[in-house]
Image (cartoon, rainbow, N blue to C red):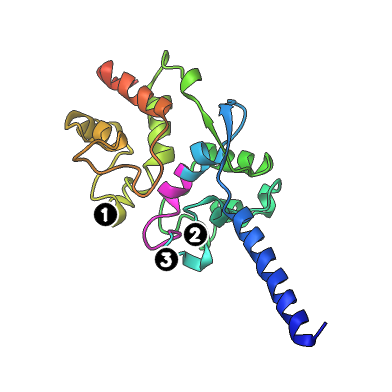
Amino acid sequence: MKKNQWRAISLLIIASVVVVLSCTKHQAAQYVGTCDPNVIYFNKDILPLLNSNCAMSGCHDAKEAAAGYNFTYYYGVMSAVSAGNPTGSKLYTSLLSSDRRRMPKNAEPLSSSQMEIIYNWIAQGAKNQTCDDNGSCDTSNIKYSTTISTIIANNCAGCHSNSGAQQSGGGVILTDYNNLIAQVANGKLMGDINFASGHNPMPKNGSQLSSCDRNKIQQWINRNYPNN
């Protein structure tokens, strides 16, 4: 076989390998059915948390990808993760750091419960999984101090906190009770998270809150949004 023919075959093989790797890299999330409360899911638990605190405009979003990290999709996040090894993952250690390298930059650090979510997801293998939690959605004991504030903290607080509101949150603060119920009273909170016509879909540039989380917020509102 002539040299040029070998060269053509070699290039074809390389191209085929690139295509296969590309398809593998961009495979869709794996749907695993009903959510297991002991499992951390990327699309339900991790991506909203990162969208709210890390993937904002000018940081680790798709446009800027600060320091080369785009945290708006699974494989962008995995560039900073060593599956099964939280303390060997830059995603976790940069959030844990106490010096100038700590992330989120110029913002409040993630809470211990949020850090635990990220730690456990990585320790469980950092899988790209999604699930359905509506069938097991418990709305019997909804409290602002635990249920509602946690949903807001994990999905909205990065943009709508004291430090983030002016930068990317349109001046709206959602991290305390009085500011939150102001958005409840004017109908914006439910309109936005339900992606209703005429509203701004929230979380911004992120996935819609799960039907269970939206149901919990609606049930809390239906009970006259107690500050409990």
Using residue 130 as the reference point, say whether residue 196 is left or right of it.
Answer: left
Q: Which residues are magenta?
A: 48-61
Q: Quadrant of the C terminus?
A: top left
Identify the residue shown where x is 70% and y is 48%.
85
Q: Which one is in front, 128 or 2?
A: 2
Using residue 210 as the reference point, say whether residue 94 is left or right of it.
Answer: right
Q: Earlier in the sequence, mark 2 or mark 3?
A: 3
| Residue at numbered disc 1 | 166
Q: Is residue 89 above or below residue 177?
A: below
Identify the residue shown where x is 43% and y is 60%.
62
Residue 86 x/y as whole percent: 66, 48
Q: Is residue 33 above or below residue 105?
A: above
How would you rate the neighbour count of disc 1 (Cα within 10 Å): few for under 14, some for 14-19, many for 20 or more? some
Residue at the outermost bottom position: 3
Secondary element type, mark 2: loop
| Residue at numbered disc 3 | 64
Instruction: Determine whether label 2 and label 3 are within 8 Å by CB.
Output: no
Q: Earlier in the sequence, mark 1 or mark 2?
A: 2
Residue 18 is inside the magenta segment: no
Residue 90 x/y as whole percent: 61, 57
Residue 56 is inside the magenta segment: yes
Q: CA distance from mark 1 to mark 2?
A: 22 Å
Residue at the outermost front position: 1
Identify the residue shown where x is 42% and y is 13%.
140
How would you rate the neighbour count of disc 3 (Cα within 10 Å): few for under 14, some for 14-19, many for 20 or more? some
